[in-house]
Amino acid sequence: MESRLEFLPLLFVLFLTFLVPPLVSRIRWLPVVVSEIIVGMMIGKSGFNLVKPDATLDFLAEVGLAILMFLAGLEIDFNLVLARPPGSRRRRISPIVFATTGMVITLVLAGLISSRLASYGLVNDPWMVGLILSTTSLGIVLPVLKDGGLSGGQFGQTILLSALFADFVTMFLITVYVALKSTGLSLDILLVVVLFVAALIVYRLGRAIAHRSAAEPILEDLLPLPSQTRLHGAIALLFAFVILSYFLGTEMILGAFLAGSVIALLGGSGLAALRGKFDAIGFGFFIPLFFLTVGINFNFGSLIRDPQVIYLAPVMLISAYLVKILPSLVFKLGFSWRETFAGGILLSSRLSLIIAAAGIGLRLGAINESTTAVFIITAAVTSTFSPVLFHSLIPTRRASEKSAIAIIGADEDAVQAGRELAARKEKVLFIVRESSAKDMVEAAGFSSIQLDGLPGSLRTARLPQLKSLLVMTPSDDENASICRVATAMGLQHVVVLVNHASRLRDFKDMGVQIFAPGLFRASLLALMARNPDLFNLLISTREDHLITEIPVFNRQAAGRSLRELGLGGDILIIAIKRGDDYLVPRGDTKLEEGDWITVYGESEQVDKLKSRME
């Protein structure tokens, strides 16, 4: 009977995870995870004491933390990390240089501040406090930049890399410090290296399997549900690294982060779908349990009882901003003062990692309950107000702006593709290298931008908001270089013309959409033979009706069924693409953010639907 009663707190907490997001969704400045911590405080030891931590809640919260760290690793764009700095006429500093310099300065400043706090008796362990202060939150930085349409530019890349470095370096250093604190300076400290060796082995195995193209038909026959198989494999890899961390005596958060990083490094066309499924599993169940449990365990009484907290809380909050804003001054070498301060403020956002690190410090005895509570308050304040301050300094792109389709290439096929797009009322922009090509496309009635240093100069060019990039140069090597830069810039839809079928594997690994005329010619002819009316519909240039794909970006539309959208009789949804899967739409089919819907209908109605989905 007692074992059954243990599930009552879990049932109550699960009900709250369902109830909290809809209630706070209208308060756009308040992150959902912060509201979950606040609700946890209300039902925990700081509030009405309705729920007390038990083994079931603690275990599920630990799984939530592992998935949260795994998702942080999965969000890494290694095209961004490994890309070379753009080679334009005006040489600009690489984002990786900004990120490394800023991280070094942050560690030095955090160490000095924590040492000063220790000298006044406000903290016990200056080393651990310094590392906790150095953290940031990639989980906040990335959505803020994406929502503002800033993640693809030089400024956005610099902020993303800085957040990534802060997450990874502090996780690694905390792991090493915990090992030193637990076992002292011994050979056991080298066990941390085993995690990296394991990650390298898994990566090499993954690459070897991915390049064995001869095995693909057999695998497809044996595994008819490849997306579910990827999910199962990713979950197994996550827990394998978590268990390995446990046996090595290292921190679980580093193992989970490395597992996600390995899968992100392997990439592939199914990576976006895998992220979506892990988001659903993590944020739909486990991660809210982690943040609610943090609030339940939060001891507000310790803040009241400890008089030092009155001084420590504001000092820690000011320090949290100083150790990020002062190092970000190096951004001024490549950006404006407004961007420099905005970047430092956004990097001051802290949430999951600082809470996890504070929990580790408490368990280790490096910090007490009062200091842990101060760090949780710091996380709540910075994660709430830093994005708001960032948006007030950096105006984001409006969703209503007309997105363009850019074409790189200026031969007859490229110009004809531009005409087809223009006939469907798309905004077309040509990106060319030579002035003669610029004259030719402008004579055909198109706008153009001349970039001498392609593909590197694509990063620094002042481009309009792009929804697609069509790469059509006659050189596969040049097309590959452009695709690497484009994906590193965060462009979600890149279509490339592959001139030689032998290069298909190179482009497939990048996750871009491929068109190989020699390979697809037979398929197109078969389509014409079997479905002539459908093919004519696809290539029709009628202006009153059209068939197109629309991405779902509107969070209010996501979660609603097609029947609830009220599309009317002049528009038809043909298919829904969700990750790697295609769904047959029905009235009760619910849209999700990130879906692509294929629609056919009267052009004016299609344009209205596009605006709604933005």
Image (cartoon, grey):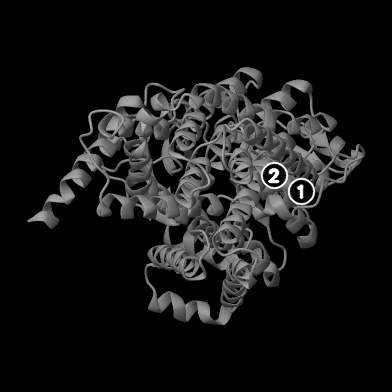
Q: Residue furthest left?
A: 1
Q: Would you say the residues marked 1 and 2 are in contact, meaning their CB atoms lie under 8 Å apart?
A: yes
Please, is residue 72 above or below residue 21 in the view?
Answer: below
Whether residue 565 is visible:
no
Closer to the camera in the image, 375 or 478: 375
Query: Which residue is labeled 2 in the image?
Result: 416
Taking the image as shown, residue 47 lies to the left or right of residue 279, namely left
Q: Left of 334 or right of it: where is 274?
A: left
State the image coordinates of residue 284 (x, y, percent, origin top left).
Answer: 34, 45
Whether residue 10 is visible: yes
Observer-nearest residue: 608 or 82?
82
Which amino acid is tagged 2? Gln
User: Which residue is found at the position 31% from the left and 41% from the top?
Assistant: 590
Query: Which of the numbered marks, if any, corresponds to residue 412?
Result: 1
For label 1, the SS is helix
Point out the residue furthest to the top here: 392
**In the picture, residue 74 is in which quadrant?**
bottom right
Query: Residue at (44%, 23%) from the top-left corner?
Result: 28
Q: Please identify the quadrant where the N terminus is shown.
A: bottom left
Q: Label 1 to label 2, Cα distance in Å? A: 6 Å
- Amino acid type indicated by mark 1: Glu
Q: Residue 403 location, x and y as percent?
A: 61, 31
Vertical placement of 475 versus 344: above or below?
A: below
Quarter occupied by residue 194:
bottom right
Q: Nearer the viewer, residue 26 or 167?
A: 167
Mark 2 Cα shell of 10 Å, populated few (<14), some (14-19), many (≥20): few
